[in-house]
């Protein structure tokens, strides 16, 4: 009997009840965001091991598939790379000599090295936001490994994003191309400040916009854009990308440029996280 | 009881697949919205109540992982599941045309709501561009996947029905 009664609930009332639950949760998370954190942690503990497991299986298959790749092509590539390597070896020798000279000069000037060394830890991406509206992903290191909110995340050759939520064993990262992202940056050649805005619309064509560049700044295509000292979240000197096209704004005071990001966002597997933090947040 | 268990597993599997395999290491890429397909399928196969409940829990997972607030995706998925439930009585088991049309409309509504809440309210105008570059690929992807996955859901549903009658 009891079972029957349960089945007879009018869907309308159930909809109303569930909507009220949603609204209560919504209010809770708007006004007391920390209160719902245990709920997120609990669900995350169940789901993330599954995602990591599926990811591991995928990687295993990927490796197995690569073995069946074209051997001829690989051999050809290997020869090419060997040539390239020899070139680089020579170059490195040359640079090393120059570096020595530079260090001597620097010690004369008593300058610190330009870019300070940061403490870093490596992590693996195990899940990404499937919706194409947002560019977020999860990494498999969290509070236990010293990855806190607002830690900077790097990929092989540039800035990738910033940690927005951090839990015990995993953390959520927002990429710099996400529509909600905004970075105070500088153009290295002239050290002029600018803003790098993440944007879904422009990223569909493969570039981001650099805004608020001073009109007198003498910048050119191909200049490197890095994070600046002014930013209170991003460390100094991390490469964001390279300028490709410069236009004057209609207000005649500032310039806007296109920026090609240094990171390939379509294939992000392993990332580096700077475990130092620019601002200490109390936990 | 068996039905609840199977549905829970299905929701988990769909969520994990959607967030790992279908968007493998690609941050900019798009993936079919398996959770929406699941909500839609159970809405039209089983009626308003089950569609609504499936949507509720699908939305809950989405909220926990990809939203700064708890609730918005839950409401969205739940209402889509509820509305899809109205098509229950016109439903023919083997017909794939109806679910394809419904998922098409669902995806459009789903993405339109996200656009309005997360983009239009932040002064990101020009829906046509967003539609072409973001909404259309995802909708197409989901529609194609529906053709395959819907049949799987139908056979799972048939199996559950048979077990319940025994």
Image (cartoon, coloured by chain):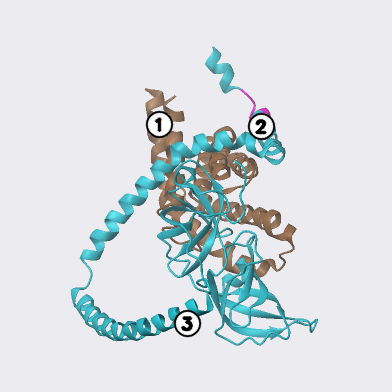
Chain colours: A cyan, B brown
- Chain name for mark 1: B
Q: Residues within 10 Å of mark 2 (few under 14, many from 20)?
A: some
Residue B160 — which label? 1
Magenta residues span A9-13
Label 2: element kind:
helix
* Pointer 2 residue: A21
Q: Position of residue A97 (x, y in %)?
A: 36, 84
Residue A8 — which label? none
Distance in Å between CA atoms under marks 1 and 3: 78 Å
Q: Position of residue B60 (x, y in %)?
A: 56, 39
The quarter of the picture where residue B23 lies is bottom left
Label 3: element kind:
helix
- Chain name for mark 3: A
- Image point 70% across, 41% down: which residue? A30
- Chain name for mark 2: A
Quarter holding the C terminus of chain B?
top left
Q: Residues within 10 Å of mark 1 (few under 14, many from 20)?
A: some
Answer with mark 2 or mark 3, whichever residue precedes in sequence. Answer: 2
Task: Evaluate if marks 1 and 3 touch, with contact meaning CB atoms under 8 Å apart.
Answer: no
- Do discs 2 and 3 belong to a common subunit? yes
Distance in Å between CA atoms under marks 1 and 2: 29 Å
The quarter of the picture where residue A133 lies is bottom right
Q: Is residue A9 above or below residue A32?
A: above
Q: Position of residue B44 (x, y in %)?
A: 54, 41
Camera-nearest residue between B59 and A181:
A181
* Pointer 3 residue: A105
Quarter holding the N terminus of chain B?
top left
């Amino acid at each position: 009997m009891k079972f029957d009664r349960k089945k007879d609930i009018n869907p309308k009332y159930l909809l109303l009840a569930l909507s009220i639950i949603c609204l209560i949760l919504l209010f809770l998370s708007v006004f007391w965001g920390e209160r719902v954190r245990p709920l997120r942690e609990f669900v995350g503990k169940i789901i993330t091991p599954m995602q990591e497991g599926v990811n591991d299986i995928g990687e295993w298959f990927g490796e197995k598939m690569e073995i069946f790749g074209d051997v001829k092509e690989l051999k050809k590539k290997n020869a090419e790379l060997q040539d390239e390597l020899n070139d680089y070896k020579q170059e490195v020798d040359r640079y090393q000599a120059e570096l020595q000279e530079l260090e001597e000069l620097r010690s004369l000037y008593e300058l610190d090295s330009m870019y300070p060394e940061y403490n870093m830890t490596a992590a693996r991406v195990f899940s990404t936001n499937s919706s194409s509206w947002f560019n977020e992903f999860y990494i498999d290191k969290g509070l236990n490994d010293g990855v806190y909110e607002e830690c900077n995340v790097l990929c092989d050759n540039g800035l990738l994003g910033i940690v927005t939520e951090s839990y015990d064993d995993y953390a959520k990262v927002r990429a710099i191309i996400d529509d909600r992202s905004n970075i105070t940056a500088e153009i290295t050649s002239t050290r002029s400040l600018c803003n790098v805005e993440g944007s879904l619309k422009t990223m569909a064509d493969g570039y981001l916009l650099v805004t608020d560049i001073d009109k007198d700044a003498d910048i050119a295509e191909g200049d490197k854009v890095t994070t600046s000292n002014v930013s209170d979240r991003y460390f100094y000197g991390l490469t964001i990308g390279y300028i490709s096209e410069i236009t004057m704004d209609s207000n005649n005071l500032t310039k806007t440029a296109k920026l090609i990001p240094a990171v390939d966002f379509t294939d992000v597997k392993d990332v580096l996280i700077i475990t130092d933090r620019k601002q200490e947040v109390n936990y | 009881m068996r039905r609840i268990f199977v549905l829970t597993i299905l929701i988990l599997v769909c969520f994990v697949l959607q967030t790992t395999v279908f968007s493998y290491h690609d941050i900019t890429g798009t993936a079919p919205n398996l959770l929406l397909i699941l909500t839609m399928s159970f809405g039209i196969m089983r009626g308003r109540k089950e569609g609504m409940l499936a949507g509720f829990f699908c939305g809950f997972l989405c909220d926990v992982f990809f939203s700064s607030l708890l609730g918005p995706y839950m409401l969205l998925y739940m209402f889509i599941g509820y509305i899809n439930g109205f098509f229950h009585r016109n439903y023919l088991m083997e017909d794939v045309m109806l679910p394809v049309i419904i998922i098409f409309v669902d995806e459009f509504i789903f993405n339109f709501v996200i656009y309005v809440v997360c983009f239009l309210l932040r002064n990101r105008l020009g829906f046509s561009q967003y539609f072409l570059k973001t909404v259309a690929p995802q909708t197409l992807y989901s529609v194609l996947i529906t053709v395959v996955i819907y049949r799987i859901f139908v056979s799972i549903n048939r199996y559950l029905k048979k077990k319940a009658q025994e």
